[in-house]
Amino acid sequence: MYKSHTKDPVAKYIVNNSLRLNDVQKSLINETMKLSYAVMLGSADSLQLLANMCKMIRAKKTLDIGMFTGYSALTIAQVLPPDGRVVTCDVSNQHEALAREHWRRAGVESRIDFRVGPAVNSLRRLLSDNAGEAGSYDFAFIDADKEGYADYYELCLRLVRPGGFIAFDNVLWGGAVLNEADQSSSTTALRQICQKLHADERVDVSILNSGDGVALAFVK
Ligand SMILES: C[S@@+](CC[C@H](N)C(=O)[O-])C[C@H]1O[C@@H](n2cnc3c(N)ncnc32)[C@H](O)[C@@H]1O
């Protein structure tokens, strides 16, 4: 019932034996699946892992780049302490009402700060002199336009503290990254971000075959 990007029976087995969703998460998934762009919904199993990792590092301040219907923001907000914060960014506020309804039902609306507009601008604003939030975030989830991933990475590297981590969704892109004939801008950008992370001494790196592929950069 819940979205997994793969028909792989091993992946299905993993989801069937590990996914835990509360009623609010189930409702938001069901409502999102009715939308024409439902394919953009983050994988519930990947987000559960990221939420568990946030719990493990006792994350308090997090970034969510690409809000859509608010599922990733909801899932992370739920594991933060009451004074925790998710700054979620989206170029569109089309699904804000649906997101807010579910954040409210989960009792986490006060932890979520939605910034509408291009994410690069929202992140730059967090770094500006007045806000001055460099090095104060524990975690960032990058899941907006793929062509923007390299810029989001550099900005998140300035915002996330050493010991925190940055996750990039969709890095396997349904396997398209393996097809060299596919030179589309999104596929190329996803290949490039993985190559960049692999060579980047500022972070430790892992790529997981979870959902549509998740790359993790652990900030040194
Ligand atoms: C894959 S969806 C995000 C899914 C969401 N994280 C979830 O868990 O369901 C990508 C979102 O990025 C947004 N987006 C695209 N380009 C953007 C940009 N330049 N700045 C901010 N958001 C952008 C889209 O409007 C869309 O809602």
Image (spheres, rainbow, N blue to C red):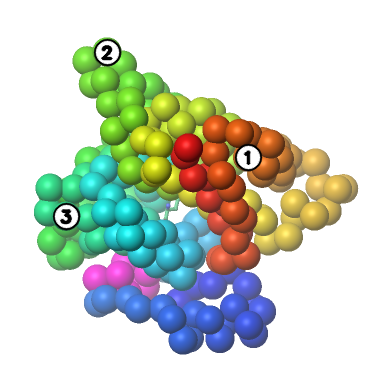
Between tags 2 and 1, which lies in front?
A: 1
The image quarter in which residue 138 lies? top left
Task: Kindly state the secondary structure of the residue where label 1 is placed.
Answer: helix
Mark 2 and mark 1 lie on one chain; the one further toward the N terminus is 2
Q: In the image shown, does 98 or 66 lie closer to the viewer?
A: 66
Q: Is mark 3 within 8 Å of ligand 1?
A: no
Task: Kindly state the secondary structure of the residue where label 3 is placed.
Answer: loop
Q: Residue at x 40, y 43 (%)?
A: 163
Q: Is residue 46 left or right of residue 181?
A: left
Q: Which mark is residue 94?
A: none
Residue 197 in the image: above or below residue 15: above
Dividing the image into four equal quarters, which quarter contains ligand 1?
top left
- How far apart are the alpha carbons under marks 3 and 2? 27 Å
Please check the rendered image and state whether residue 27 is part of the magenta-colored stretch, yes or no: yes
Residue 122 in the image: above or below residue 163: above
**Residue, disc 2:** 129
Mark 1 and mark 3 lie on one chain; the one further toward the N terminus is 3
Q: Mark 2: few, some, or many residues within 10 Å (few <14, many ≥20)?
A: few
Image location of residue 153, percent across then percent down: 51, 34
Residues shaded magenta:
24-31
Q: Which mark is residue 197?
A: 1
- How far apart are the alpha carbons under marks 2 and 1? 28 Å
Image location of residue 43, percent across then percent down: 48, 65
Q: Main secondary structure of the magenta part?
A: helix
Q: Mark 1: few, some, or many residues within 10 Å (few <14, many ≥20)?
A: many
Q: Which mark is residue 81?
A: 3
